Image (cartoon, helix red, strand yellow):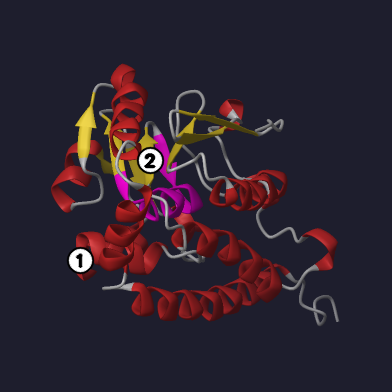
Amino acid sequence: MGATRKLNLAIADGVATISLNRPERHNAIDDELRDDLSRTWDAVLADRSARVILLRGEGRSFCSGRDTSQLGRRPNNETDLAFIRYTQDVRVKQLGSYKPIIAALRGHVLGGGLELALAADIRIAAADLRMAFPEIRYGLMSDTGGAPLVTMLAGPSRAKWMLMTGRPVDADRALAWGLVDEVVAPEEVDGVAAALAREIAAAPADALALVKQTVDGLWHGALHAALRQELAAQAVLFAERSSRRQPDPRAGA
């Protein structure tokens, strides 16, 4: 496959490796990278040579979430609802993958980057991991599956702790809470994740798909219902945030 400026894709030994490539911004997701991810999911899911998908980030971090320089900006005059729906559609492509997805996590794993990681099937973490939902500090919340995914993995009270405080979780706590599956040294995380991806890719593709389908079927309906709730809730929060920024027309009257 090809490469884009902000995302690289390579396929070898049955593994499609998707690398976020904005290391100078801790792989923060701007509009261009979001569009690249959408197209890349389409390409990888259609490519029969890719049996397993490996997600990783270049540089010191996996992904620091939404690029805050674009927070609240809407391309092509989209409404908040349309913007969130499109972003959710990208996540739904990932969640609908019948191919196993492994995430290699290091450094910052924040906001939308954490949702990207939690939507993977298996997570290998570096010991320097710091994962958090910082949206609450902007008067916002998760909107591409963060709330239901962290609830299913860590439990409701821990999900509320993360979503309501925005405080970070380190690698040891993430492992204890079930948010990651293995913790390794930072210099080992890519190699360990890649070796696991190749091991899984060696299994029959149909068997992998059926295992994934069976496990995911236990929570599929609840997750998609929660995504609709996140869509509505985040649209309301964006509207409230926008109204707070508007000057009072009566000021100076």
Mark 1: which amino acid?
Gly
Query: Which label sits on residue 155?
Result: 1
User: Local crowd at mark 2 within 10 Å, few (<14), some, or many (≥20)?
Assistant: many
**Is tag 2's residue or tag 1's residue first in the polypeptide sequence?**
2
Mark 2: which amino acid?
Ala
Say which element carries label 1.
loop
| Magenta range | 108-122
Viewer-closest of 252 and 171: 171
- Pinpoint residue 129: horizontal percent, then vertical percent: 32, 34
* Residue at numbered disc 2: 103
- Pinpoint residue 173: horizontal percent, then vertical percent: 18, 44
Could one spot residue 160 in this view of the protein?
Answer: no
Say which element carries label 2.
strand
Residue at (59, 66) in percent of width and height: 89
Q: Is residue 230 magenta?
A: no
Left or right side of 23 for 160:
left
Viewer-closest of 89 and 167: 89
